[in-house]
Image (tube, helix red, strand yellow):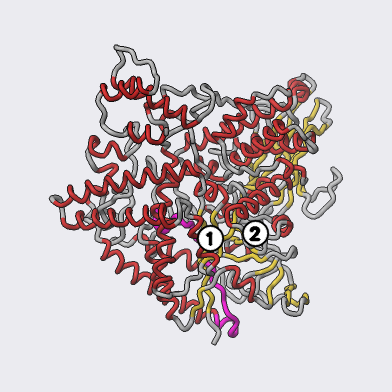
């Protein structure tokens, strides 16, 4: 019996934030929160389903900066300290909430147990590097881990510089290989941003498949017979999977999306903001600025009710809701499959549902539980087959050839999130850096002096870090703008300083050493990538 | 070693304990030093050990004061991050924003910047040529658009263009008082995104088993498609409001397409 194939794709990404010169740095908390709330819960899901012998098929990109951060000893150490503090705080909360409310007390106990389990997994099971966990489940066929371009750079804005695109892809492939021990088969293009011609570079690096937004197929050079419900192959022999808008809407939409359910946990009520300052001080930013702790006692209740009026949260209620939502999602996918099978005359539709991984757990606290229940429910379905991207590529027999259209998954589907009045100033610098990098790579193509090679490779790191699409994105969304602006300027400045050093021949070893220490991504960066024009 | 020291510092310590520790570490303790002073001194010491690098090459702040713990921000010299606003190179760059809008920015060499100030120049223009699928020789564009610009004071331009999917080429040039036009800069080729389904009448397929390519007349799309209306509200922002202080502080989820 033909079935519908369902492919869930999680894109796990955070920009590279590591400040080894500080014991506490606010933006490093992004990583720590995501480890506690998203990445480890996904591993927990694998473990639970493994215990229940439920098959799991997931596709997940872990971007190069995220891999570098997860494998970084200093960040691992800082994370462990952070988690220990959280455990200490939840112990206090267990006592304190005893007198406050039974539901709060129940949650405090839940958090304590949950954080302790997280610490156990992090420290004892995965030896502080959770990539070990993902590697293990990849080897066992649970998850297809794919890569991303080096620093999540926005590739359409490098179209006139093939060497810059190649460097982004080559560094992405190399970083994946260094951490995972094998070559990546698939890639998640930063922001799902594609332009005709990009597939040629992917093919050069042995990439077999990538992902695009729906209109990338709808507006392709020839009409896709099966719409977004079958992958296509480009003239350069790379498979492209397109996003199913229906599945996204069921999870995303403000009106009908699951995460907005009143019984789910409210993201914006955190004891980091609720408890009195003296008490919470050791667990927030040492400067006294209040931050999220991850301990939250309230549910969404109703979108109309202000934060102060929210009711208490109950994890068991929320789990029941997640269960119902998982069942509902399976039922909706089955109905969609019936419809598509009929339309396609029995040919199996392939439904691709990509999401930011951090939606699950960090924003939508019950997201990983929903995923777990979805896998359970889907395994019982006679109509669905949950698959990984690599499975489809291995099985597919006949595929339409076309060139997808320029597109991204940003607001309105094109480039405006990464190019508008708030961030347009960065491109003068980013393009100039590419030109200088290329020029220097040519002038030093046969460089033997190890010190000069170090300067050249550090220039690569500064350039790649400056190219992260996150900075332009943050400038657009008006959150943490100062940090994004400063990061961009800092990498531009450091790059120009290194360029001047090399140009003048007057290399300050101390300064070079400092930059290698503070911008310590990609130990294997190689400036010769920029010779590939 | 520095880790133990940092952990030790996390306790609630008396000034006597702190001073004893500082002496033990060989740091010079002065009588008038306050508890915070001594604590800071030990913190710095731990930090130095951690870096195990020559003094002076350590902590340098790269971010605004908001993000740095107050203890350290006083200690660390801020890295000067002023960057140039011109590279004094002749450059005109065209970038696609969406099917209807393109963006230009430019930079000028000193000779050209002073040329544009000269009294021979009547007006300066930004030209846009539609060169879709042609070898452009300067005269054969499908269409040519022109607007007056002040390239010394304005360094970029957002332009509404008529044809999605077209290939545009930009040019900055000037007219003298005799009406003669001179080119100054030309841009890269800018390919605009498409915003509608293809009109192509063929379909190509690859049979992966037989390694064969098949070309046939187009059968159109079997699935009905509900397209988005450009510029419409996506509805995601309402659910995932933007977080303040600390959390993955940017709404990676707002504005994802539907």
Give the crowd class for mark 1: few <14, some 14-19, many >=20 residues within 10 Å. Answer: some
Picture residue at 51% right of the left edge, 29% below the top: B52
Q: Which residues are magenta?
A: A341-362
Question: Percent from the top left, x then y, of residue A422?
Answer: 53, 38
- Tag on residue A183? 2
Is residue A6 toward the left or the right of residue A50 in the image?
right
Is residue A518 toward the left or the right of residue A256 in the image?
right
Question: Percent from the top left, x then y, of residue B105?
Answer: 67, 36
Q: Nearer the viewer, residue B215 or A518?
A: A518
Question: Percent from the top left, x then y, of residue A343?
Answer: 57, 81
A35 vs A240: above or below: above
Disc with the residue nearer the chain's start (1 vs 2):
1
Picture residue at 55% right of the left edge, 42% below the top: A472
The secondary structure type at the circle numbered 2 is loop
Residue B215 shows in the view = no
Identify the chain of the residue marked 2, using the numbered disc in the image: A
Residue occupying the far bottom of the picture: A1
- Tag on residue A135? 1
Picture residue at 27% right of the left edge, 45% below the top: A89
Q: Nearer the viewer, residue B118 or B74?
A: B74
Q: CA distance from mark 1 to mark 2?
A: 13 Å
B192 vs B54: above or below: below
Q: Nearer the viewer, residue A393 or B34?
A: B34
């Amino acid at each position: 019996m033909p079935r519908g194939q369902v492919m869930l794709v999680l894109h796990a990404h955070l920009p590279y934030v590591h400040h080894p010169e500080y014991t506490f740095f606010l933006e490093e908390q992004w990583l720590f929160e995501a480890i506690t709330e998203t990445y480890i819960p996904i591993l927990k899901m694998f473990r639970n389903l493994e215990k229940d012998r439920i098959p799991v098929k997931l596709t997940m990109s872990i971007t190069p900066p995220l891999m570098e951060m997860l494998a970084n000893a200093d960040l691992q150490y800082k994370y462990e300290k952070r988690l220990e503090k959280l455990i200490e705080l939840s112990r206090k909360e267990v006592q304190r909430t005893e007198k406050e409310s039974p539901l709060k007390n129940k949650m405090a106990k839940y958090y304590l147990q949950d954080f302790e389990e997280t610490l156990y997994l992090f420290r004892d099971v995965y030896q502080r590097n959770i990539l070990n966990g993902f590697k293990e489940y990849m080897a066992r066929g649970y998850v297809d881990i794919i890569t991303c371009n080096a620093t999540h750079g926005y590739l359409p804005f490098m179209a006139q510089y093939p060497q810059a695109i190649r460097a982004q892809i080559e560094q992405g492939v190399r970083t994946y290989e260094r951490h995972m021990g094998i070559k990546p088969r698939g890639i998640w293009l930063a922001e799902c941003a594609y332009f005709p011609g990009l597939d040629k570079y992917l093919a050069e690096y042995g990439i077999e498949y990538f992902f695009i937004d729906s209109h990338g197929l709808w507006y392709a050079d020839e009409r896709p017979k099966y719409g977004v419900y079958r992958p296509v192959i480009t003239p350069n022999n790379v498979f492209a999977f397109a996003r199913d808008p229906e599945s996204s809407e069921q999870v995303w939409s403000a009106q009908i999306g699951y995460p907005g359910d009143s019984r789910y946990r409210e993201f914006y009520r955190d004891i980091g903001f609720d408890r009195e300052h003296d008490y919470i001080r050791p667990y927030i930013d040492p400067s006294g600025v209040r931050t999220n702790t991850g301990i939250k006692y309230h549910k969404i209740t109703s979108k109309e009710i202000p934060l102060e009026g929210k009711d208490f949260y109950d994890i068991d209620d929320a789990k029941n809701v997640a269960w119902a939502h998982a069942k509902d999602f399976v039922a909706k996918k089955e109905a969609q499959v019936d419809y598509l099978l009929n339309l396609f005359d029995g040919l199996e539709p392939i439904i691709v549902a990509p999401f930011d991984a951090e939606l699950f757990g960090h924003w939508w606290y019950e997201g990983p539980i929903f995923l777990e229940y979805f896998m359970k429910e889907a395994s019982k379905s006679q109509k669905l087959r949950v698959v990984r991207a690599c499975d489809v590529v291995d099985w597919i027999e006949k595929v339409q050839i076309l060139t997808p259209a320029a597109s991204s998954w940003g607001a309105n589907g094109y480039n405006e999130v990464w190019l508008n009045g708030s961030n347009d100033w960065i491109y003068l610098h980013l393009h100039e850096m590419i030109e200088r990098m290329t020029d220097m790579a040519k002038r030093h193509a046969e460089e033997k002096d190890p010190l000069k090679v170090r300067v050249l490779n550090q220039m690569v790191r500064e350039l790649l870090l400056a190219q992260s699409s996150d900075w332009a994105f943050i400038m657009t969304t008006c959150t943490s703008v100062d940090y994004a602006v400063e990061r961009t300027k800092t990498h531009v400045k450091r790059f120009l300083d290194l360029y001047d050093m090399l140009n003048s021949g007057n290399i300050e070893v101390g300064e070079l050493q400092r930059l290698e220490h503070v911008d310590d991504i990609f130990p294997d960066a190689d400036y010769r990538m920029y010779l590939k024009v | 070693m520095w880790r133990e020291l940092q952990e030790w510092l996390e306790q609630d310590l008396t000034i006597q304990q702190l001073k004893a520790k500082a002496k033990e570490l060989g740091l010079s303790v002065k009588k008038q030093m306050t508890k915070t002073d001594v604590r800071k001194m030990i913190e710095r010491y731990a930090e130095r050990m951690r870096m195990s690098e020559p003094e002076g090459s350590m902590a340098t702040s790269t971010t605004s004061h908001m993000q740095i713990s107050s203890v350290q921000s006083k200690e660390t010299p801020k890295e000067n991050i002023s960057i140039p606003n011109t590279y004094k190179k002749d450059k005109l760059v065209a970038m696609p924003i969406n099917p209807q809008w393109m963006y230009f920015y430019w930079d000028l060499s000193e000779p050209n910047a002073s040329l544009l100030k000269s009294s021979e120049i009547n007006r300066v223009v930004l030209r846009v040529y539609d060169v879709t699928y042609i070898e452009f020789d300067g005269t054969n564009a499908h269409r040519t658009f022109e607007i007056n610009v002040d390239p010394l004071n304005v360094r970029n331009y957002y332009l509404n263009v008529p044809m999605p999917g077209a290939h545009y080429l930009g040019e900055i040039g000037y007219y003298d008082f005799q009406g003669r036009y001179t080119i100054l800069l030309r841009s890269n080729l800018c390919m605009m995104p498409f915003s509608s389904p293809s009109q192509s009448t063929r379909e190509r397929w690859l049979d992966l088993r037989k390694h064969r390519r098949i070309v046939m007349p187009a059968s159109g799309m079997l699935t009905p498609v509900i397209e988005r209306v450009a510029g419409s509200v996506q509805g995601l922002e309402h659910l995932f409001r933007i977080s303040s202080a600390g959390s993955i502080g940017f709404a990676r989820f707002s504005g994802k397409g539907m």
